[in-house]
Image: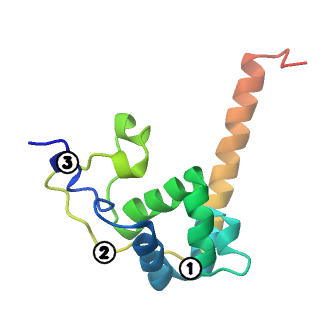
Amino acid sequence: MTNKDIYKNNPLHGTSLETVLTTLVDHYGFEILAAYMNLNCFKQNASIESSLKFLKKTQWAQEKVEAFYMYQYNSLPKADDANFELPPRDRIVPSGLEQRPPKELSLDDAEELRIKQAKKTRERAAAATSANPWGSR
């Protein structure tokens, strides 16, 4: 097995960023993408061209879109800890995992997810503060 063979099951293998973005916009639309990923390129004057320009310049945003494509659109199971640390294009997807139909997403679900994430962030911040009561001054 060659190095390239281990990435064959990754849905990003051989897929351009433009194809990923066009597929997501065609299926979900900019409003759902903005709600789930909170990227301004999907919120204000959104277009494939302008979003692509931003994503090509902004690695973290590109990885966010590619992860969304893998785990929402392709409905793959979440990556294990070792793969989670890698950029989505470098993740190894075990053979035998079938891509499933895209997840159905709604604006209501996006808002619930945002509230859950904000709560987790507050809890982590509180835990960090209690672990270091002096904080940084």
- Tell me the residue at 73%/33% (across/down): 125
Image coordinates for residue 19, horizontal then vertical, percent:
40, 74
Q: Quadrant of residue 18?
A: bottom left
* Label 2 secondary element: loop
Residue for badge 3:
4
Comes first in the chain, label 3 or label 1: 3
Side (left or right) of 101 relative to 68: left
Comes first in the chain, label 3 or label 2: 3
Image coordinates for residue 104, horizontal then vertical, percent:
44, 76
Could you say which is closer to the camera, residue 63 or residue 18?
A: 18
- Determine the CA span between mark 3 and mark 2: 25 Å
Residue for badge 2:
101
Residue most toward the right?
Answer: 137
Q: Amino acid at mark 3?
A: Lys
Q: Amino acid at mark 2?
A: Pro
As drawn, the label of residue 48 is 1
Q: How many marks?
A: 3
Comes first in the chain, label 1 or label 2: 1
In this view, 60 is above or below 50: above
